[in-house]
Image: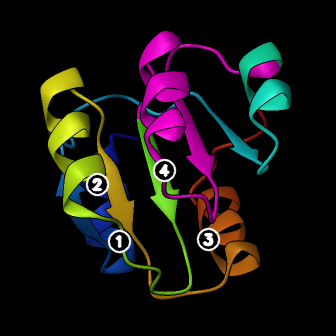
């Protein structure tokens, strides 16, 4: 499933980047070192963090997208940097649990 297909399926919004990548797995975590150690290309990362280091970690492993749940706002500086680095950030109005469940329901497992 591509990021764009996931967006359409769930009514989520892309705040940065192009939603074209194929999603190969999911990580739900806010500890950057944990995500850096376990993330792989194509990962969809669910996190409530919205600072520049999120963009750095996502671009390091060429993640498919970063999903920011609970309607949390992401600053323009972070979104501008994400666009520059080609990181797709999705805004989801649901809880992190519901975002993870949506990925699971779409047949996407762990990273």
Q: Start and end of the magenta stretch? A: 38-64
Residue placed under numbered mark 4 in the picture: 51
| Distance CA(mark 1)–CA(mark 4) | 27 Å
Q: How many marks?
A: 4
Residue placed under numbered mark 2 in the picture: 5
- Assign a secondary structure to mark 3: helix
In the image, what residue occupies the spot 26% across and 37% down? Answer: 82
| Distance CA(mark 1)–CA(mark 3) | 12 Å
Upstream in the sequence, badge 1 or badge 4? 1
Q: x and y percent of residue 111 in the render? A: 74, 28
In the image, what residue occupies the spot 60% across and 44% down? Answer: 45
Vertical order, 34 against 70 (above or below)? above
Residue placed under numbered mark 1 in the picture: 9
Query: Badge 3 local density, few (<14 within 10 Å), some, or many (20+)?
Result: many
Residue placed under numbered mark 3 in the picture: 99
| Distance CA(mark 2)–CA(mark 4) | 26 Å
Q: Are marks 3 and 4 in contact (CB under 8 Å)?
A: no
| Distance CA(mark 3)–CA(mark 4) | 20 Å
Q: x and y percent of residue 81 in the render? A: 22, 36
- Assign a secondary structure to mark 1: helix
């Amino acid at each position: 499933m591509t990021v764009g297909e996931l967006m359409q399926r769930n009514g989520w919004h892309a705040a940065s980047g192009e939603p074209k990548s194929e999603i190969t797995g999911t990580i739900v975590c806010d500890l950057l070192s944990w995500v850096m150690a376990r993330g792989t290309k194509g990962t969809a990362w669910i996190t409530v963090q919205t600072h520049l280091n999120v963009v750095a970690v996502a671009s390091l492993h060429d993640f498919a997208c970063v999903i920011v749940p609970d309607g949390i706002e992401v600053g323009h500086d972070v979104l501008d940097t994400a666009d520059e680095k080609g990181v797709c950030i999705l805004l989801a109005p649901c809880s992190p649990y519901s975002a993870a469940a949506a990925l699971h329901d779409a047949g996407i497992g762990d990273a």
